[in-house]
Image: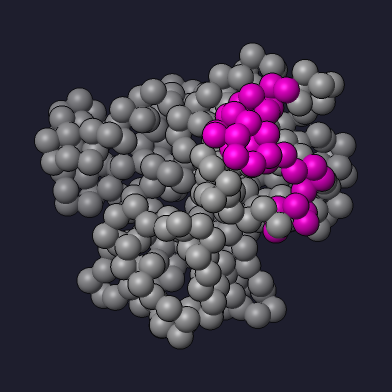
Amino acid sequence: MYKILKKQELAANIYLMDVEAKRVAKSCQPGQFVIVRMDEEGERIPLTICDYDRTAGTVTIVFQTVGAGTGMMAELNEGDAFHDFVGPLGCASELVSEEIESLRQKKIVFVAGGVGAAPVYPQVKWLHEQGVDADVIVGSKTKDLLILEKEMEAVAGNLYVTTDDGSYGRSGMVTQTLKDLVGEGKTYDLCIAIGPMIMMKFVCLLTEELGIPTVVSLNPIMVDGTGMCGACRVTVGGKVKFACVDGPEFDGHAVNFDEAMRRQQIYKTQEGRAQLALEEGSTHHGGCGNC
């Protein structure tokens, strides 16, 4: 059992938990994720690692209640425990494998949308610990939905906050802030964007126009987390990939976002899964038993 040591409501329906998971904390890296289950019959829920403390043996997760499984998670309190807390899974951020001196020469900008701030944070923190300061753009619909601002401010070189309704920070979408920064003379060698699929799509359209290589994390489309269910199937550079086992990070300019978002919607219904199985033939994954 994996005890919940801390629970905090960051915003409406968005929660942070510190979980005692020594093995995961010992080996996890920024960009990876875990799968949690509340009991033996519980839903498998993949969640990107937000932070970790190797000394304390804890892993921090952040989640938003969007369905029955995460709704049940929100009812857990400090002292309660998860039945399963499996990880680390997925590939670590490519930043971790780069030479530090090379990273220090790069100008990096992160773009986080909504709960995407949670998986962005450990990467920015890791860079800060290596002496690399990156610019960070964090966007949310309103000020009330903004999360991890203080934590991000402590590790970012420059933090730019924007809200869709203009209630806090800059007004407008994250893409507008990125465009403004470049217009003000900022130059970037790499952009890392994490958030809703539609946000990442439009960030990539902008960065392609600006000539900035871009990495995206496709954790929003993961369901099973093991490559069996096929929910996170995506075409990258003309090749079929699965976000949970091949990613979750990919070259954003090579991702077919329109196909991925269409598939994400169709996959939600039994009829839709049957249609996908027909369309995709032998390349279709149906290990979840739902299709």
Which quadrant holds the C terminus? top left
- Residue at coordinates 50% horizontally, 65% vertically from top-left? 9
Percent coordinates x, y for residue 206 in the rendering:
61, 19
Q: Residue furthest front?
A: 167
Q: Is residue 244 above or below residue 260?
A: below
- Residue at coordinates 43% horizontally, 44% vertically from top-left? 220
Residue 156 located within the stretch drawn in magenta? yes
Percent coordinates x, y for residue 272 in the rendering:
17, 34
Horizontal side, residue 217 vs residue 281: left or right: right
Percent coordinates x, y for residue 98 in the rendering:
75, 44
Horizontal side, residue 63 vs residue 119: left or right: left
Q: Is residue 280 above or below residue 119?
A: above
What range is drawn magenta here?
151-180
Its colouring scheme is one colour
- Residue at coordinates 67% horizontally, 74% vertically from top-left? 54
Percent coordinates x, y for residue 118 in the rendering:
57, 53
Residue 118 located within the stretch drawn in magenta? no
Res 220 visible: yes
Kindly indicate the quadrant of the structure image that contains residue 39. Answer: bottom left
Foreground pick, 247 / 111: 111
Q: Residue furthest top?
A: 209
Horizontal side, residue 196 vs residue 268: left or right: right
Which quadrant holds the N terminus? bottom left
State how many labels appear.
0
Q: Residue furthest bottom?
A: 79
Kindly indicate the quadrant of the structure image that contains residue 174. Answer: top right
Foreground pick, 257 / 101: 257
- Residue at coordinates 78% horizontally, 56% vertically from top-left? 154
Q: Is residue 238 above or below residue 88?
A: above
